[in-house]
Image (cartoon, rainbow, N blue to C red):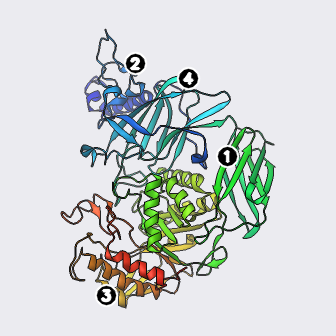
Amino acid sequence: MKLTLAGRLARVPATISRNLAVVILLCWCSAVIAAGAEPAAAPIVLTGADRRPATSLEGEWASIVDPYFSGLFSFHHEEKKNGWFLNQKAKPGDPFPIEYDFAKAPKLKVPGDWNTQRESLLFYEGPVWYERDFTYQPKERTRTFLHVGAANYHSWFWVNGQKVCEHEGGYTSFNCDVTSAVHAGSNFVVAAVDNTRHEDNVPTLETDWWNYGGLTREVSLIEVPETFIDQYDLHLHGGQDSVIEGWAHVMGSEAGTKVEVEIPELGAKASAVTNDGGRAAIHLTVKGLERWSPQTPRLYKVVLRAGQDSIDELMGFRTIETRGTEILLNGSPVFLRGVAIHAEAPYRTGRAYSDKDAETLLGWAKELGCNYVRLAHYPHAETMLRAADRMGILVWSENPVYWALEFDNPKVLVKAEQQLDEEIGTSRNHPSIILWSMANETPNTAARTQFIETLANRARALDPTRLITAALLVRAEGNTKIVDDPLGNALDVIGTNEYIGWYEGHPDTADVTQWRIAYQKPMIMSEFGGGAKAGLHGEESERWTEEYQANIYRHQLPMLNRIAQLRGISPWVLMDFRSPNRPLTGIQDEYNRKGLISERGQKKQAFYVLQKAYKDGTIGKAD
């Protein structure tokens, strides 16, 4: 938490040591942020939260920028704990002024990042307060959750002045129990969101994308019965089309609670009872099931019931596995013709969140000829995954373990595990996801390897039905690229990144490059490419021109075809995206220009080079 203590320290008696004063004030601050209420319960993970009855809280929220986090303190009445989360109103005769007023504050749209909504906030990093009034009518024997699709990075929430939850992590959804905080009639919710980067965050201080702050995805109120299904997992059993297995967990249930699962279109129905841990094992016999694939993205309505609770889900069923150096989808070898995608909104820029954003980005990927996308470098919105399910696009989904985290810090591992749990717990039933990625471009150290091996083991325990990967760095000996990072031992599929023709050598350097892979496993070239400004033209030897970027692709594709165990590619990247690491005036202007399409939708020459290769089978096999 980012706090400014100088003013408070100045008022500490000289008899108290400054270090002790800091400890006292930080402890006091913790009490202030709790607003005098009982400690808020930790947020919970809900599978299929978007399938629940919901009251949307999207729209305009009042906002106050608070770089010193003054809203946690009261300058004049500290003993009254009157932080901004109480949403107080000035009254005649008050002995001291209230120096904030959400009713008069400027608005920010939710969902949305604050950076692209207000010019003064483009580069801002720090806390911003949000407030939204809403009318609500609680129901008997019903629990109400505040569902947050994502809030970057550290966030706190209060309803009617009562703290309801705190969350760390900017790319996963979470749900705060507000049952005891809401009441009939007028209510208000206050959120403090802080996108300040810290060394012990996941991701850490430096990334190569924009640190979009705020309530960046949907916010709503979700209603469930007192006993309800919070998570579930259904998949084909052992590759058999006739058996679907899995489990459902019922929160608040007693052992023996009945759970029913039905797929009406297949005339299939089964029931089971929960064990002492609230989990019921599901075994469902079906006939005539059509497997989900890019060619036939078949989705079925699946109904789950437990007591008064019922969920109508949309699911597809398929298998994914490896055999030697092959990736098998539904038992047959598949080549992943893909592209990497950041969650950058097309045309308007900023954080992508809507159905329209997803359909535009994935529509471009389909036009390119893709059957697969790498959703980098963090979990993307539920809208993106639902669109991939509908459109038949395979997905690599990634935990935000990026570059050089504090791999020897146990607290950082806990944060990475939490985000992995939330990613898998939220998204495990999307048939489009075939790969859980543990990390991207991490340094080869013993601490790193142990850290990510721990995550890989955790992912397999949470979801043994998908493949584990990570994007590795490679090393070189002369013209030979070597993939022997020891992390490869923990992976089912090896991902590798390289930028021949951009960060090393020239485009034709690829012509003489050979590859030596230490693992007899499938490999995906998870990144390659180069930058170009859309509309800038010149010779093939001139950097930043469309011609130069297209030339990289022309030399890369034959080289990639020489890698015997290559089973997919996802060049970097579908669309230009904002990055503060890219300041070249007149060319980059704080955008990473490696996109095949500009942020304004202009397709570059390299788009058509790759499109032709995908559609005529020059790389991989065309459908």
- Residue 93 place in picture, x, y as percent: 31, 8
Q: Is residue 538 left or right of residue 330?
A: left
Gap in Å between the C-alphas at discs 1 and 3? 55 Å
- Residue contact between numbered discs 2 and 3, judged by CB atoms under 8 Å: no
**65 relative position to 559: left or right:** left
Structural distance between the alpha carbons of marks 1 and 2: 44 Å
Residue 151, x across and y down, in percent: 44, 45
Q: In the image, is 172 to the left or to the right of 206? A: right
User: Which residue is the site of mark 4?
Assistant: 184
Q: Which residue is mark 1?
A: 311
User: Residue most toward the left?
Assistant: 585
Question: Vertically, is 192 above or below 74?
Answer: below
Callout 1: 10 Å neighbours few (<14), some, many (20+)?
many
Q: Amino acid at mark 1?
A: Ile
* First reached walking from the N terminus: tag 2 or tag 3: 2
Residue 446 as seen in the image, left or right of residue 204: right
Measured in 3D between alpha carbons, the distance from the residue under mark 3 to the one under mark 4, in whole angstroms, is 69 Å
CA gap, disc 2 to disc 4? 26 Å
- Residue at figure coordinates x 76%, y 44% from the top left: 276
First reached walking from the N terminus: tag 1 or tag 4: 4
x and y percentages locating residue 362 in the rendered image: 46, 64
Tag 2 or tag 1, which sits nearer the N-term? Answer: 2
Q: Secondary structure at mark 3?
A: helix
Q: Nearer the viewer, mark 3 or mark 4?
A: 4
Q: Identify which residue, 370 or 321, lies in the foreground.
A: 370
Determine whether the residue tagged by mark 2 lies in a helix, strand or loop: helix
